[in-house]
Image (spheres, coloured by chain):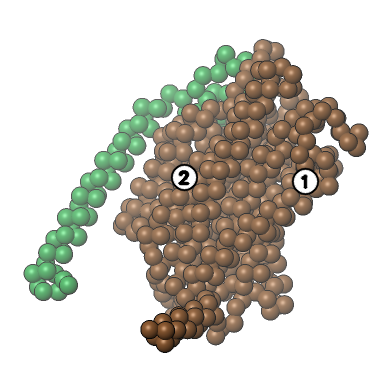
Amino acid sequence: MRTGEVESWSQSPETLGPIYPFVGAEMLFFIICLLILMIFLAWKFRMERRKYDRAVELHRNGQMK
Amino acid sequence: MMHDELSALSMLFTEFYYWVTVVIMFLIHVGFCLYEVGVSRQKNTLNTLMKNAMLIPVITAGFFFFGWWIYFAFQNGPGITGGLKDAAQAKPWGELMGTHLGGTSAGGDLKDDQLATWPRLNGVFWAAFLLFSWTTGSILSGAVIERIRSGAFWLLALLVGSVTWVIDAAWGWSDSGWMVQKLGYHDAYASGVVHAIAGGSTLGILCVLGPRIGKFTPEGEPRVIPPQNAWLVVIGLFLIYTGFWGFYAACNVPIFEIQPESGEAYFTATTIYLTPTTLSAVTFNFLMSLTGGLFMGYFLSKGDPFWTFSGGLGGIITASAGNDLYHPYQAFLIAMLGVWCAYRLHYWVERRFKIDDAVGAVAVHGYCGAIGVIVAGFVLWGYPTTPAGVETEYAPITPWGQLAGAVIMFGVLGFVPCYLLTLVLKKLNVLRIPREVEIAGLDFHIIAEERVQLEEVENAARSES
C-alpha cells in the first residue's frame, strides 16, 4: 500500500517531482477546502444574526446593561 | 572544510541558520510566560511567572551535563539496533563542548570527520535542541499552575526536558534511531517527539497532583476558573506561533548533500531524517495547518479567544508529523481533524477523570500530537524512511508503526515516568503547596511585604511634609 509516488530517497532527484501523497487528487482537495471556507462564513453570518437579534431583544426588554 | 571557500560558506551558513532559529524560538518562551501569567489568578502571578521562567536554567544545565550526550548515545535503544553510540562531541567533559577551531584534538582521540564539522556546529545545534527541551518543560508548566511547588515542577521539567524527550528524539527523531529503522517512525516537526510526550507527561503529573481547590463542585461538575487577563493569554499564544517558525526551521537541515544512486551531487534542505524537503513546502504547510486549526477552534468554541488560538496551535501540532510531505490542503484538513478530536477529548477527560488542566496542554499538545503521528501513518503509508545513500533498508511509514510510535511517545516515555516521579514527590510531601497558601495565593508574602513597604513610604511622605 502506498499513498505517494516516491519509492526511494536514493533514486535520482531528477525523477522526483511532487512528493505529497495522492498526486492527482488536488482538484478534489481544492473543492473540499473551498467548501469548508464557504460553510464557515455562512455559519458565521447565521450565528451573528442570531446573536445580535437576541441582543436587540434583550435591549428592548431593558435587560441589556 | 574551512580551506575551500564554498565549503566554508556552507558551514558558516548552517551555523548562522541554527543561531537565527534559536533567537526566534526565544519568542516561544516569552509567549509561554505571558500565556501562563494571563491564565493564572492575580494572587498567583509572580510565582507562576518565576516557576516557568526558571525552567530555563534548570533544563539548560541538565541538557549540557547529560541531555546532549543521551541524544547521540541512545539512538540504538541501546540494546535494540546496537549498543551505546559514540558521542564524543557531546561528552560534557569533552573538548568539543568548548570553544574549538577544529584544527587538532588536544586529547588526540577525535576523528577527522568529527573535527571537520562539530567545532563549528555543536553549539548552535545543541542550542536548537535545547530550545525544544525548554518547550517540553513549558508545556508541562501551564497545566500545573497555582498548586504545584516550584522545586517539584523543576525536577519534573528536568526529567522531561533533559532525559525523556531526548531519549524519544534519539529513538524517533534522528536519521538512524531504532524507531525510524524498525517502525518506519516519521515525525518531521515533532508532533510526537515534543508535543505528545510533553502532553503525556503532563497527564501523568495531573493524575497525581489533583485539581485546584474549587475547580470541581462536590457533585464533580467542573467550574470555569476565568483567566485574569484574556488579552495576555492570546498575545502569549500569538508569540508562541511566531516562535514556532523558528522551531520548524530548526527541525530542518538547511543544506545537505544527499547521495542518490545516480552518484550525482545534489544539495537540498532535508528533515532531521536527511530526507529531502524544501523550506517553501514547509511554509505552505505551517500556514495552512494554522488556518485549519484556527477555523476549527473558532467553530467549536463559538469564537472563544483562548480556544480559537489554542486551536491554531493544535492544528499546527497535528499536521507537524508529516508537514514535510503533505500537500497544503491535506495539512489544512488534518489540522481540523486533530483540533476537533482534542477539544472533545479535553472536556471528556476533565469530566470523566476530574483532571484539571488549567491551559488545555494535554489536549493541544498531547492529543493533537499523538493524533498527528497516527494520521501520518495513514496519509503517508508506504513512504520510504531510509535516507539517500544509506545501505541498511529501514521500514517504510505504516499506520501500525506510527501507532506504536504514538504509544511510546505519549505513554511509555511521556505518561509513565512523570506519573511515577510525581508519586514519589507526593510521598515525600514536596509536591503540592499547602491548602492555606493555595487559598491565600502563592504571592501572599510578596503582597504582604509590598503593603508594608507602601505604608512605610506613605507614612514617611506624610511626616516629611
Chain (brown): B
Q: Is residue B349 above or below residue B464?
A: above
Q: Residues within 10 Å of mark 1 (few under 14, many from 20)?
A: many
Q: Residues within 10 Å of mark 2 (few under 14, many from 20)?
A: some
- Give the camera-side residue of B263 and B367: B263
Residue found at the far right of this picture: B108
Q: Earlier in the sequence, mark 2 or mark 1?
A: 1
Chain for numbered disc 1: B
Is residue B412 in view? no
- Give the camera-side residue of B30 and A59: B30
Same subunit, tags 2 and 1: yes
* Left or right for B108, reference B369: right
Chain (green): A
Q: Position of residue B70 (x, y in %)?
A: 76, 47
- Give the camera-side residue of B390 and B401: B390
Residue at left 61%, top 33%?
B16
Please tell me whether mark 1 sits on a helix, a strand or a loop: helix
What residue is disc 1 on? Answer: B69
Q: Position of residue B187 (x, y in %)?
A: 60, 40
Q: Amino acid at mark 1?
A: Trp
Q: Is residue B45 above or below residue B369?
A: below
Residue at left 61%, top 38%?
B19
Residue at left 57%, top 38%?
B20
For residue B242, the mark is: 2
- Classify residue B425 by image quadrant: bottom right
Chain for numbered disc 2: B
Q: Position of residue B252 (x, y in %)?
A: 59, 34
Q: Amino acid at mark 2?
A: Thr
Residue at left 75%, top 34%?
B119
